[in-house]
Image: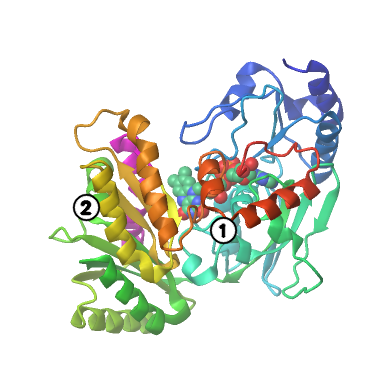
Amino acid sequence: MTDLSFAQRLADTLGTDAVSTSADEIEPWLSDWRGMYKGKAQAVVRPSTTDEVAACLALCSDARVPVVPRGGNTGLCGAATPDASPNNVILSLDRMHAIRSIDTTGNTMVAEAGCILGNLRRAAEEQHRLLPLSLAAEDSCQLGGNLSTNAGGVNVVRYGMTRELALGLEAVLPNGEIFHGLRTLRKDNTGYDLKQLMIGAEGTLGIITAAALRLYPRNDVRVVVLAAVNSAQQALELFELLFERGGPRMQAFEFFTAECLDLVLAHVEGMRAPFAERHPAYVLIELADTVDETALRALVETVIGEALERELCTDAAVSESIAQVNSMWRLREEISEAQRADGPHVKHDVSLPIEAIPAFLETAGERVEKHHAGVRLIVFGHFGDGNLHYNLSRPSGAPRDFFAQHGEGLTAEVLDEVARYGGSISAEHGIGQLKRDYFSRYKDPLEIRLMREIRKVFDPHGIMNPGKIF
Ligand SMILES: Cc1cc2nc3c(=O)[nH]c(=O)nc-3n(C[C@H](O)[C@H](O)[C@H](O)COP(=O)(O)OP(=O)(O)OC[C@H]3O[C@@H](n4cnc5c(N)ncnc54)[C@H](O)[C@@H]3O)c2cc1C
């Protein structure tokens, strides 16, 4: 039952305009981006300051009211969606979107957790700096969500995941205490690194209110290569060559199969096939530098020439302009949307030791086909990080609800195979509600026990994002 008096106390503390309680206002906050989950809540709270977040959590903690942190809601595991309890309070930081500072000497940015990632990237760019975190959802997702999922994206091969970009955090603990860890120090070996526990915690340890992030020099010179490959083994050898010759200039090494490109060409307007022939798979490589386009281009051409000679790829196109850079990237970035347009599907965001990818693709494909013939494999991802989006689409002609019956069995086949190669069942999307059962099946029991104990230390009353991760 809705606890009116509690919602009233929230409104008395934070102001009525920061607290929504009517069913109409709450409705848009109850489901996830993919429409897989829907929950309930008594209120949506949108504080404007860290002190207001602290006041809100103190009230929730005293009353043992569950709190569900919500960023841009682009997460793919249902981690920002409330469960079925009508008591939930959804807490959004969308009003906390200030950039507190950009320091071009120390090369840091301090920003509030409600900032949209794309805005932060543009603000850094204006100061001739690069915030390297980049993903297709960057104009919707928020910094708080990125930190809480330890988001990856397309530049991990050069700059690492969100974890590697965070120098400091400000957060509010579930009891309302403020964690003042907003340091910009590059070196700080003073005991346990507590901020790293909160990064990737999917809102289970508190609310992140601001972060200090590393900035890098802006890479104005960019060259993209789209290479056609016959196999994942070729892609792997190409990666080795690019790593060796491109060094730190290589900032993306993405992979997608012919089936992915088919979907993009079928469902996304204005897309053109990059080569006259259809090839089994493609690799998109970006190299970038601060200056000297001629030198970068010469390097790319030499390396690709060598790759063609050594038969590490069968064809290659090199971008000539920023417009071409963008259109090549669209072939890769539109895959998720194209698969969505194709109909219901099952996603697996897995990672593997990179050298195991070719063998995994072969044996996982065999298991999927054996489990149910005709299931279409839509495989793409951040190959250079060992991260594959190993997605399945229903067989041609199968009913739209095909995965209601077969989804679980197919997922078990894929994840068992991931585990056999020493991989991870979640590379960058997290656990949320979607992978909770698989998490308990595949994660080491000792690690789960330590995580449960840590969660209890931060949140003894268990109010933060119940039902997420475990
Ligand atoms: C088209 C598309 C492409 C994507 N590509 C990538 C990709 O390449 N790489 C990648 O890693 N992800 C990708 N994602 C997934 C998603 O964008 C990321 O997980 C992103 O980091 C989520 O941010 P968000 O603000 O939308 O968070 P939400 O979905 O709102 O929340 C995610 C989690 O963070 C918690 N949370 C949110 N804000 C806070 C806070 N202030 N304090 C504490 N907890 C908080 C929530 O409770 C939840 O557990 C993609 C998604 C889409 C739709």
**Image quarter hosting the N terminus:** top right
Query: Where is 384 relative to 336, above or below?
Result: below
Tell me the magenta residue range.
322-346
* For marks 2 and 1 on the same chain, the one whose residue lies earlier in the sequence: 1
The stretch drawn in magenta includes residue 341:
yes
Indicate left or right for 169 with 362 as reference. right
- Residue type marked 1: Arg
Q: Residue 101 carries which label?
A: none
Q: Where is residue 262? Give x, y as percent.
A: 22, 48
Q: For mark 2, what is the residue?
A: 272
- In percent of the image, x 77 and y 66: which residue is there? 192
Q: Which mark, by number, is residue 121?
A: 1
Identify the residue at image location x=30%, y=82%.
Answer: 303
Q: Label 2: how many residues lie within 10 Å, few (<14), some (14-19) or many (20+)?
A: some
Task: Give the x, y percent position of residue 46.
Answer: 72, 34
| Residue 285 is a magenta residue | no
Amino acid type for the residue under numbered disc 2: Arg
Q: How far apart are marks 2 and 1 (CA)?
A: 29 Å
